[in-house]
Image (tube, helix red, strand yellow):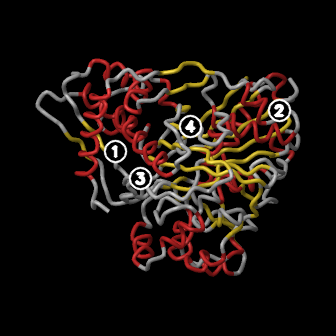
Amino acid sequence: MAGCVLAIDQGTTSSRAIVFDDGFSPVSVGQQEFPQHFPKSGWVEHSPSDIWTSTLRVCREAMEKAPDQGAGVEAIGITNQRETTLIWDRSTGEPVYNAIVWQDRRTSEFCAGLREQGLEETFTAKTGLLLDPYFSGTKIAWLLDNVDGVRTRAERGELAFGTVDTWLIWQLTGGTVHVTDATNAARTLIYNIHENRWDEDLCKVLNIPLSLLPEVKDSADEFGATDAELFGRPIPILGVAGDQQAATVGQACFKPGMVKSTYGTGCFALMNTGETAVRSHNRMLTTIAYRLNGKTTYALEGSIFVAGAAVQWLRDGLGLIDSAEQTQSLAEQADPNHDVYLVPAFVGLGAPYWDADARGAMFGLTRNTGPKEIARAVLQSVGYQTSDLVDAMRADWSDAEKPVLRVDGGMTASDWTMQFLADILGAPVDRPTVAETTALGSAWLAGSKAGIWPGEDAFSAQWQLERRFEPKLSEADRQRLLAGWKDAVTRTRTSAD
């Protein structure tokens, strides 16, 4: 079983590890959920120790379950929840505070103040991002300014900042390596994606010492080796990418114009734009899709904060379902003549609206509205939001035709949801045979760097379709449903800007 790669997929609600064989098939899996912390309204935190211990546990579990207890694993790839922000002591490895999660909105006022100073254009021109609490930069600033002693220690060079990939690499290497990759750096609000470097001017605006920041490497690169005590031998870490970029790679979206959409806690659509960093005029993000051999490939990205999280809300918040699988059968039984719209702005609206202060709302309720109609509205909200993203991407890039959408993530298991997605897009939706595309993408980065897996062309040729969903809805019905959705969003937003 030589030629295996261990992929670490550290997500928002769970940590997973998967061993892939040299045929790109998963042969063992370890997974563990960990707690979410909500200390105040709009605040979301994780314990850094939970992130690390759960990751280590699932890696060992996956290795033990693999043939020969993982003896054939020759490299490690890491993919991670992006933008989640940690700062820790370089000497002790002790975090100064909890990890501030990408969903966290505590820096909304800070971002608004920067916009009022006319600084958004400066940030967007260099980073491709907008001034929103979503990104890491203002989270770093908050930690420096609100946790006792942190700024002083940071200015003395005693502390290290990292997104989750950096934190895991630090732990895996026994605190000897402080690095990240270009895709994660591109999500910090302080990385110049055109010049591929930390931007001193943006760091000055946010008052962030450069000494905090990790070295930035290619997505397939040498990120150090694991401490021998963790897995019985050192294993090289050779691939790193933020989860959405890793899914783009795992879906083999290597050609300009290809689009993938991942449905997990949130929903994230990326369109490969090749060597061109397309500037959005529709409040999409310009980001780095991956960087290989020093060559940067860019993408347009749309981020939806709540997708699968809305299903969790049905289960944990409302108690309408016991498991996510129940939503499909409920949706199938809903009254077809009863249109209910959920705008799931539980933590604000993402692209293309970027309304941090908007909150969730439901429209079209009558006395006949029940769990079936609400469940259907939750699943449909994912399709409507994806339609907004794809329309904005096509408006931004004249080279983009109406794409075939390659999908992955937990929600894609629902045939009903995927059919509605195809219907509301008016375009085919392709679901791959290997559902673990995010982990597979990080594994390919590591495996190709190690020389044990093939390059882009051979990897792309082995991408396999499990099912294509063709649109069946009439154009008149599609436009009617979209009009209702746009009206619901307009009513939910805090401003029309």
Give the mark, 1 or 2, whose residue is nearer the N terminus. 1
Q: Which amino acid does label 2 sit on?
A: Pro
Other residues around mark 2 within 10 Å, as few (<14) / some (14–19) / many (≥20) = some
The residue at which mark 2 appears reads as 454
Disc number for residue 352:
3
Amino acid type shown at disc 3: Pro
N-term-proximal mark, 3 vs 1: 1
Instruction: State the SS at label 3.
Output: loop
Image quarter where the C terminus lies is bottom left
Q: CB atoms at circles 3 and 1 under 8 Å apart?
A: no
Disc 3 crowd rating (10 Å Cα; few below 14, some 14-19, many 20+) is many
For residue 21, above or below residue 195? above
**10 Å crowding of disc 1: few (<14), some (14-19), many (20+):** many
Q: Which residue is drawn at the image coordinates 41% and 23% (left, top)?
A: 471
Return the residue nearer the eye: 283 or 215. Answer: 283
Q: Label for residue 260?
A: 4
Q: In this view, does 156 lie above or below 263?
A: below
Q: Looking at the image, tell me whether mark 4 or mark 2 is earlier in sequence order.
A: 4
Task: Identify the residue shown where x is 67% and y is 64%.
Answer: 194
Q: Which comes sooner in the sequence, label 1 or label 4?
A: 4
What's the CA distance linking mark 4 and mark 2? 22 Å
Give the answer, above or below, for where 94 lies relative to 270. Answer: below
The amino acid type, in three-letter code, at marker 4 is Lys
